[in-house]
Amino acid sequence: MELSDAAIKKLIEKTKGKDNGIRLGVTGGGCAGFEYIFDYESKINDTDHLFDYGKFLIIIDEQSMPYLKDATLDYIIEGINEQFKIINPAEKSACGCGVSVQF
């Protein structure tokens, strides 16, 4: 998983003074079949993959790694809307609302 410069900058800002773990993953759900997970947390499981960026830690569970290995986490600003976005070449389609994806 790659992180854009904008995502790194925003994650450093958002994790100041908090648990510095960010869990990224994929779970079943939504109309297209899968939804991305993005949670601030510090709990680490034995099978998790850890990516230490110094000021924060990316945590990805074993089952999500194949889906996220070539993905990029970006931080997008469009008008008054700002959000983290996972850009993933493994996606085959997404639902109309943009919440769920299919691989």
Image (tube, grey):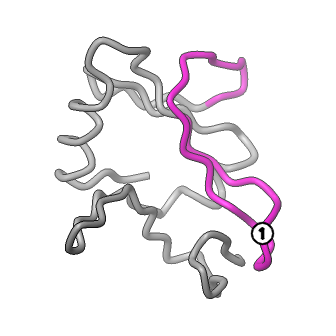
Label count reads 1
Horizontally, is 24 left or right of 35 in the view? left
Identify the residue at image location x=55%, y=23%. Answer: 41
In the image as oriented, which residue stretches furthest toward the front?
Answer: 80
Q: State the SS at label 1.
A: loop
Residue 29: which quarter of the image? bottom right
Relative depth, front residue between 19 and 51: 19
**Magenta extent:** 23-48
Up-down: is 87 above or below 56?
A: below
Is residue 27 covered in magenta? yes
Q: Which residue is drawn at 23% across and 30% down?
A: 12
Residue marked by disc 1? 30
Above-or-below relation of 28 to 20? below
In the rendered view, tell whether residue 61 sits above or below residue 56: below
Q: How crowded is mark 1: few (under 14 residues within 10 Å), some or many (20 or more)?
A: some
Where residue 36 sits, quadrant-wise, is: bottom right
Does 54 sit left or right of 30 as displayed? Answer: left
Up/down of 34 relative to 43, above or below: below
Q: What residue type is labelled 1?
A: Gly
Residue at 46%, 24% (x, y): give it. Answer: 21
Screen quadrant of the C terminus: bottom right
Nearer to us in this view, 19 or 53: 19
Residue 53 in the image: state x and y as whole percent.
29, 29
Classify residue 91 by image quadrant: bottom right
On the image, the x and y values in percent for residue 97 come to 60, 80
**Residue occupying image coordinates x 76% and y 79%:** 32
Where's residue 61, x and y in %? 67, 37
Q: Where is residue 102 in the image (x, y as percent from the top left)?
A: 71, 78
